[in-house]
Structure formats: structure tokens, C-alpha cells
Amino acid sequence: MNLLGIFHKKKSYSCLLLNNNLHFTSRNTLEPCCSANIGPVMVKDLDKKNSIREFIKEKQKYINMLKNGDIPEGCKNCVHLTSYKKTNYLKINKITLNHYTQCNCACIYCTQGNRTLEKIKEDEDKPILYDVLKFINELYDMSIIDKQKLYIDFQGGNISCLKNYHDIINTFINRGVGTIYIPTNNIIYMPVIEKLLAMKKGELCTAIDSGCSETYLKIKQVDKFNKVIENLKKYAATKKSQEAIRLKYIIIPTINDNIHEFKQFLKIAKMLHVKNLIIDIDARYSRMTEYNIDPYFINLAEKMNSIALRQNFVTEFYSFLLQNTNNKKMYKLNILQNIIKRIKFKYFNKKIKDLYLYHHYGLNRLFDKKFIF
């Protein structure tokens, strides 16, 4: 036995995202995650693939690499890496559908780039690269989906522009799903969303970012404010559905970065009887300033939060702002926040470490039993 080898044994790692996630991308690839890091690409050219088995094979390869202490290039310095522990690798409990980019509004902060009204029209008939439904059915047929915990995350363009969204959602409903998260601008009413909310299997998130049609138009570049509110009224018709809806306010410098607009936004939330709110900041601004967010915006977000709390809303800072809630889980959050503050983020400026969390996931959602990341 080589005693020297024992003392120099590599540390083993694991990653829940790698173990349990699927990410269908608009790059025509299948990947394990869409975290702040790139992660390994497991299957390329999905439009030419006939089987999901290649993904399972690649997934196991990377899992074994981490177990043996070899970290894939795309996973280095990722906050999701943990010390190795046994887990069920062949159960998928989160699927991200990010395979489409079509949208029917032109938000000025869109991560798809400078989307214009002309680009919207061009994208209307743009074909989807591959049929994601074929792969979803194959996953179910292989019995590697944890149906009770399965969390579906639509993260592409706007779901109403995905021509077969109805078939995709009903497949999940019929074959077994825990929760389906749908971020949508609500310009188009979708009956299947109301069905999901009634079944307590849906989470709806809409970024209104404004309290009036004028500001909405400046941000979204489409005059659909009244239509969005009208559709939200339909979705928020019952107490059960009201609890499943979250309204988002993204602070955009020089446009809606004031308390007056935010108070108008709160009036809309009250009218809809929606209590769950998200306060965020324009990701473009964060990146352009290398995450040196001006104290004005931090103070503004904190003031907005205080006003919302006084009006009995449940608040959540998101993405590039520190997480917080006003519910009974707060003591758990405080513990985790203190741990996270000690994490050394390689890619972010020191001044933002205390404000930045995961790119997609709110900290308080880690305690939602339906949400498995």
C-alpha cells in the first residue's frame, strides 16, 4: 500500500445541480444547470439526437469525476460544489426549459440583448431548435424522474410565445409533477396557468416594474399595461391562486427608481390581493458597474422593502440584491446569510459579496419543500 498516496488523496465533491437537474438550452445543448457558472455541456446538437441516454451517461461521468476529486472546467469555483455525500444520482427533480427565446414585449433590461419591436416580429415565426417534449416523454419512460418533487422552471422567452406550451404543461400534469414555475409578462391569458394555480401545482411570477401605464411603456416598449392587469385579475380570482402569484419590481435607474412609482405598484398588488413581492435591480446596471451598486439603489431597495412590510406584504430581495423575508423562516435565513457572507466569490467585487446570492434562486425558496435545486 502506498501510504504517501493515502495522505495525498484528492478531496471528493458533489453537486446537487449536477446530480438532479436538467437544463434544456437555446444553444441546442442539454446541460446540468444554469447557475452563475457555465457547468459541463453534456449533449450537443439536440436537434439531431434521438435519445436522452447520452445525457445520463455523461452525467454519471461528471459525477464520478467530482467524486474522484477532478472538477470539470465549467464547475471550478462554483458555490454549488459540496463535499461528497451519497445521493440518488439517477433521479431528476428539476428541469429548466430555456430552449426558446421568443417574446412579445421588448423589456429594456432583457438579457437576450437589445430586443426591439422589430425583433419581436422577426421572432414570431422563428422555429424552435428541437422538440423538448420528445425528450421529456423519454425521461418519464426511463423512470428517472422524481414525480413528487419535480420542479419545472420555464426560463426562456415568454411562455405564451411557445407554440406547444399547452402540450408541455399538460404532459407534466398528466405524467406527474410537483410544481411548475412560470415567469410571464401576462400579455396573453393562458387558461392552463389558471388550471395549474387551482391544482396548487403552479407558481406565477410577473415583473410589472411600474405602477402606471406610462412607466410600463417606457420599460416594456409595448402598450399592454391594462391588459396585463386584466389577466392578473383572472389569475388572482381565488385566495389559493393569490398565494401562488408573485409580483416583481425591478429597479431601473432613471426610469422607476423612486418611491412614488413603487407605492403605485403596491396599490396594484393590493387590488389584486397578492401579498408576495420581489424587489430586484436591473442586471445590466449591476454588470456595467462591475457589481458596485450605488448606495442610493441599495438604500432605495431597503426603503421600498420597509414600506411593503408595513403594508403586510411578504417581500423578497432577488438576484443581485440580498435575500430577506418577513416570515417565520427568518431565523433560518439569518444563519444561512452569515454563512454565505463568508463564501469567497471569485467572479464578484468584494463590495457586492454581501448583496449577491444565486443568479436564479431566492434564498427563502430553499426552505420550500416543493423547491429542490
Image (spheres, rainbow, N blue to C red):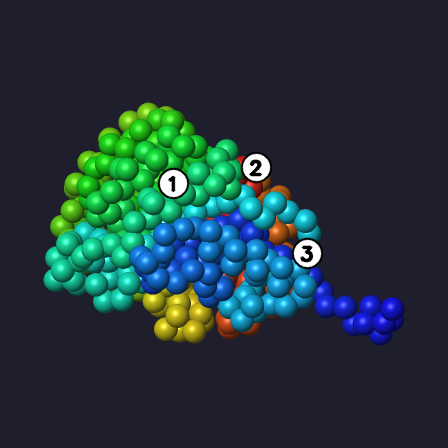
- Relative placement, left or right, of 288 versus 90 is left
Q: Residues within 10 Å of mark 3 (few under 14, many from 20)?
A: some
Disc nearer the start of the sequence (2/3): 3
Task: Tell me the element at label 2.
Answer: loop
The residue at which mark 1 appears reads as: 137
**Quarter of the rendering occupied by the N terminus:** bottom right
Name the residue at 23% across, 67% down.
114
The residue at which mark 3 appears reads as: 84
**Is residue 361 something that shows in the picture?**
no
Task: Tell me the element at label 1.
Answer: helix
User: For the residue marked with disc 2, what is the amino acid?
Assistant: Lys
Tell which of 17 and 239 is nearer to you. 17
Residue 322 in the image, given as x and y percentages of width and height: 50, 56
Tell which of 109 and 182 is nearer to you. 182
Disc nearer the start of the sequence (1/3): 3
In the image, residue 89 sits, relative to residue 47, either above or below, namely above
Tell which of 185 and 309 is nearer to you. 185
The residue at which mark 2 appears reads as: 328
Disc 2 and disc 3 in contact, CB within 8 angstroms: no
Name the residue at 82% across, 68% down.
6
In the image, residue 125 sits, relative to residue 233, either above or below, namely below
The quadrant in which residue 237 appears is top left
Q: Residues within 10 Å of mark 1 (few under 14, many from 20)?
A: some
Q: Residues within 10 Å of mark 2 (few under 14, many from 20)?
A: few
Measured in 3D between alpha carbons, the distance from the residue under mark 2 to the one under mark 1, in whole angstroms, is 39 Å
- Relative placement, left or right, of 295 versus 114 is right
The quadrant in which residue 300 appears is bottom left
Measured in 3D between alpha carbons, the distance from the residue under mark 1 to the one under mark 3, in whole angstroms, is 31 Å
Residue 336 in the image, given as x and y percentages of width and height: 61, 52
User: For the residue marked with disc 1, what is the amino acid?
Assistant: Asn
Name the residue at 34% across, 35% down.
171
User: For the residue marked with disc 3, what is the amino acid?
Assistant: Tyr
